[in-house]
Image (cartoon, rainbow, N blue to C red):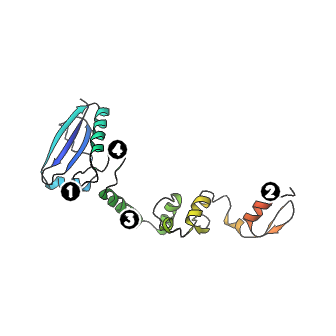
């Protein structure tokens, strides 16, 4: 057989971990768990492994998924944090805490400008501005506006109009009308002028 499904049982605490492995039962493989609880308990507690089934890799993946789908992964009884690598993470308290800690580690080593650049390039992460719709500044051109409006209209279009174009005197080449508001002039004159 090319793979097997197993269950590790912590006899000290009564917790379990289910997984599959491509290889043999005696190749020294423990598991691929990323649970901090699992590895902390592994060092101190009494464990045993039960082989649930053997088969092809595809069959073992399907069986592992079926088992993990049938149990409550939010329960502290299980060390598993996901249904399988290809089928998504279950956001248990431990997983959420690991994500929060990782974000804090990343941001701790960055400057404010680097953090702003990350938030600009991916407006879906870490900004209180999203929650209360407070004002944000575009890091490219310095335009300030409400977060939702800036996300919807400005961030993806920024760069088409440079800050220099936003301040100054403009004259329509067709009707010779002058104005200081470039967006208004662009809307009603230049290529859209009635006298064109």
Residue, disc 1? 40
**Residue 119 seen:** yes
Q: For marks 3 and 1, give the CA distance.
A: 22 Å
Q: Which residue: 19% across, 51% down?
A: 15
In the rendered structure, find residue 192 and report the number of the disc placed on it: 2
Which tag, 3 or 1, sits closer to the chain's start?
1
Instruction: Give the crowd class for mark 4: few <14, some 14-19, many >=20 residues within 10 Å.
Output: few
Q: For marks 1 and 4, give the CA distance.
A: 22 Å
Which tag, 2 or 1, sits closer to the chain's start?
1
Q: For marks 2 and 1, give the CA distance.
A: 68 Å
Which tag, 4 or 3, sits closer to the chain's start?
4
Instruction: Give the crowd class for mark 1: few <14, some 14-19, many >=20 residues within 10 Å.
Output: few
Q: Quadrant of the C terminus?
A: bottom right
Q: Secondary structure at mark 2?
A: helix
Q: Secondary structure at mark 3?
A: helix
Residue, disc 3? 104
Q: Which residue: 19% across, 45% down?
A: 8
Q: Is residue 181 left or right of residue 146?
A: right
Q: Secondary structure at mark 1?
A: helix
194 or 70, which is in the foreground?
70
**Residue 24 seen:** no
23 lies above or below 33:
above
Which tag, 1 or 4, sits closer to the chain's start?
1
Q: Position of residue 27 (x, y in %)?
A: 20, 38
Q: Position of residue 142 (x, y in %)?
A: 61, 68
Q: For marks 4 and 2, give the CA distance.
A: 54 Å
Instruction: Give the crowd class for mark 2: few <14, some 14-19, many >=20 residues within 10 Å.
Output: few
In the rendered structure, find residue 129 and report the number of the disc placed on it: none
In the rendered structure, find residue 85 and report the number of the disc placed on it: 4
């Amino acid at each position: 057989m090319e793979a097997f499904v197993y269950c590790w049982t912590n006899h000290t605490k009564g917790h379990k971990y289910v997984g599959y492995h491509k290889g043999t039962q005696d190749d020294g493989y423990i598991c691929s768990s990323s649970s901090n609880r699992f590895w902390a308990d592994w060092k101190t507690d009494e464990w045993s492994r039960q082989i649930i089934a053997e088969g092809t890799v595809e069959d073992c993946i399907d069986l592992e998924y079926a088992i993990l789908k049938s149990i409550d992964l939010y329960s502290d009884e299980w060390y598993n944090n996901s249904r399988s690598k290809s089928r998504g993470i279950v956001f248990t308290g431990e997983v959420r805490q690991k994500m929060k800690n990782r974000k804090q580690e990343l941001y701790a080593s960055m400057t404010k400008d680097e953090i702003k650049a990350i938030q600009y390039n991916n407006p879906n992460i870490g900004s209180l501005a999203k929650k209360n719709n407070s004002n944000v500044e575009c890091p490219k051109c310095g335009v300030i506006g409400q977060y939702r409006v800036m996300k919807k209209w400005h961030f993806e279009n920024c760069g088409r109009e440079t800050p220099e174009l936003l301040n100054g005197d403009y004259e329509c080449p067709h009707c010779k009308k002058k104005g200081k508001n470039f967006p208004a002039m662009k809307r009603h004159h230049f290529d859209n002028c009635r006298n064109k």
